[in-house]
């Protein structure tokens, strides 16, 4: 092998080692993003916002066009008119759905006003890959968002904030394999940890359940509040099936999240949790 | 000019992946367009060029993701290098061969990514990794190849992406 080939292999090895070091140093545990990453995220935010808005519009338009194809065959003469009316109807339907969604969020906000302080945020981007499940929302450090704040929707738990730039925040979804949520089975109060499988599956699993714990399909899993990141009692999902771990001590439950995390549009960031004062009766008190 | 255009193509592919592609995901999986561009480029221009573009495209993806910077850079670099190995051995004009290269390159790139996840301590079961991510992404990229490869090839041999003669 020539001298220049050795040099190339040496340089490649150095590059791979430096990159592996970068992988280690930029894990989820670090406190802040580098200025370069913050700049990339902030400068891409408006582009993402416009692109996702355009994509939603196109998606809605294509869906309505697909519906119209069927109508057109039956009503050739009225094709144009029907198309316009249908398009309007679709738009109205879209507004209705949006209205219902926002009303639901507003009601939830009012319902939980004494439990959480909530901030509404719109989803403007997603992880470009298929392994991880993260979303980018249009609220950042300037709005008071901080790392490790929980993110929810009226349907249930979404995830937690893992990185913040000035105008955006990155949310780690509960379906991400890096996510772990302390949880309990609502019916039996059996504790465990809900972790992501691989984002594309859309499923999570509850691990560290005692082998003889009374866990059955159909039971509901909620967050336990242990660990301090996620508030307690937030709905996560429904148990689909259970299986014993090969180790013999625990069982694992497959859980289907209540929230379809692939179609999120708006979310709530929990900026504060109000803990009610509980006065427990102490033994011996009069 | 050529470098700017490649950078732009990777940037657009990345923004599309982070926004629009969720609307066209099949079984929860979306195509890896950045990887596809890297594979095409490597297949047409060779190992070294494929590895360079793979590293650049991967690094851009990593910066947008913001965590574990280097995972995409290394895996896409390997995929670009592998695709480049076919440059002198395979018939580049043939879309069917390009589709096979895309499938193989995507499987390799995603498998290296999976292995790096394990090294980093992120546990994804082999079953879920292979059947819910690696294989569907490879098939999706393979399906997109006949639609995109022809244009990319023409641009790389006769158009704006053509390498300057030395």
Image: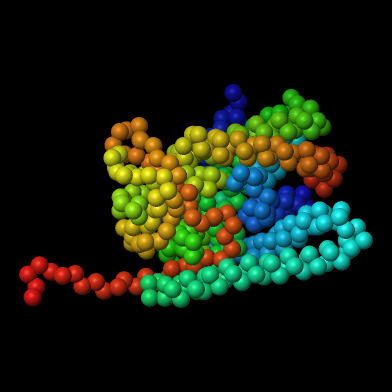
Image point 59% across, 57% down: which residue?
Answer: A263
Q: Is residue A182 above or below residue A82?
A: above
Q: Is residue A186 left or right of residue B47?
A: left
Task: Specify the quadrant of the image occupied by residue A76.
Answer: bottom right
Image point 40% across, 40% down: which residue?
Answer: A242
Q: How many marks?
A: 0
User: Can you give x and y, in whole percent of width and height, for residue A84 in the image?
Assistant: 83, 67
Looking at the figure, which quarter contains the C terminus of chain B?
Answer: top right
User: Can you give x and y, in whole percent of width and height, for residue A50 in the image?
Assistant: 68, 65
Task: Specify the quadrant of the image occupied by residue B29.
Answer: top right
User: Can you give x and y, in whole percent of width and height, for residue B40 in the image?
Assistant: 72, 39
Image point 49% across, 67% down: which residue?
Answer: A268
For the residue pair A182 and A171, the one nearer the viewer reads as A182
For the residue pair B132 and B83, the one nearer the viewer reads as B132
Task: Specify the quadrant of the image occupied by residue B76.
Answer: top right
For the residue pair A56 and A259, the one nearer the viewer reads as A259
For the residue pair A101 and B98, the one nearer the viewer reads as A101
Q: Is residue B47 visible?
A: no
User: Can you give x and y, in whole percent of width and height, for residue A59 in the image?
Assistant: 72, 58
Way the structure is coloured: rainbow
Q: Is residue B142 above or below residue A80?
A: above
Give the residue at the far right of this rendering. Answer: A77
Image point 77% across, 56% down: which residue?
Answer: A67
Q: Is residue B145 visible?
A: yes
């Amino acid at each position: 092998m020539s001298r220049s080939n050795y040099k190339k292999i040496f340089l490649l090895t150095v590059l791979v080692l430096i990159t592996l070091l970068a992988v280690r140093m930029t894990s989820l545990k670090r406190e802040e993003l580098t200025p370069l990453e913050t700049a990339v995220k902030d400068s891409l935010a408006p582009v993402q916002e416009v692109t996702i808005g355009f994509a939603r519009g196109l998606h809605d338009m294509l869906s309505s066009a697909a519906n119209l194809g069927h109508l057109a065959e039956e009503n050739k003469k009225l094709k144009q008119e029907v198309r316009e009316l249908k398009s309007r109807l679709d738009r109205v339907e879209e507004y209705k759905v949006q209205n219902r969604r926002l009303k639901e969020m507003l009601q939830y906000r009012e319902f939980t006003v004494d439990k959480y302080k909530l901030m509404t945020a719109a989803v403007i981007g997603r992880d470009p890959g298929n392994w991880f499940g993260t979303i980018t929302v249009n609220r950042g450090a300037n709005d008071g968002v901080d790392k490790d704040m929980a993110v929810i929707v009226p349907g249930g738990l979404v995830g937690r904030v893992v990185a913040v730039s000035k105008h955006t925040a990155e949310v780690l979804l509960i379906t991400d394999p890096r996510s772990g949520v302390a949880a309990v089975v609502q019916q039996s109060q059996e504790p465990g940890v809900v972790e992501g499988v691989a984002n594309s599956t859309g499923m999570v699993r509850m691990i560290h359940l005692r082998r003889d714990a009374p866990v059955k399909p159909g039971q509901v899993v909620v967050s336990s509040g242990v660990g301090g990141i996620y508030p307690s009692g937030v709905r996560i999902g429904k148990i689909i099936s259970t299986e014993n771990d090969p180790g013999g001590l625990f069982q694992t439950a497959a859980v289907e999240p209540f929230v379809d995390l692939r179609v999120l549009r708006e979310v709530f960031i929990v900026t504060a949790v109000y803990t009610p004062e509980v006065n427990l009766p102490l033994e011996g008190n009069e | 000019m050529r470098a700017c255009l490649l950078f732009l193509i990777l940037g657009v592919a990345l923004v599309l992946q982070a926004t629009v592609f969720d609307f066209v995901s099949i079984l929860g999986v979306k195509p890896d367009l950045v990887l596809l561009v890297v594979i095409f480029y490597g297949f047409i221009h060779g190992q070294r060029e494929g590895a360079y573009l793979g590293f650049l495209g991967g690094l851009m993806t990593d910066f947008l993701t913001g965590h574990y910077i280097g995972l995409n850079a290394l895996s896409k670099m390997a995929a670009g290098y592998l695709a480049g190995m076919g440059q002198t051995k395979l018939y580049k004009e043939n879309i069917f061969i390009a589709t096979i290269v895309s499938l193989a390159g995507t499987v390799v790139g995603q498998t290296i990514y999976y292995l790096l996840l394990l090294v980093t301590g992120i546990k994804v079961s082999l079953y879920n990794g292979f059947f819910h991510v690696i294989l569907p992404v490879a098939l999706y990229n393979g399906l997109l190849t006949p639609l995109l490869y022809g244009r990319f090839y023409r641009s790389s041999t006769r158009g704006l992406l053509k390498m300057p003669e030395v």
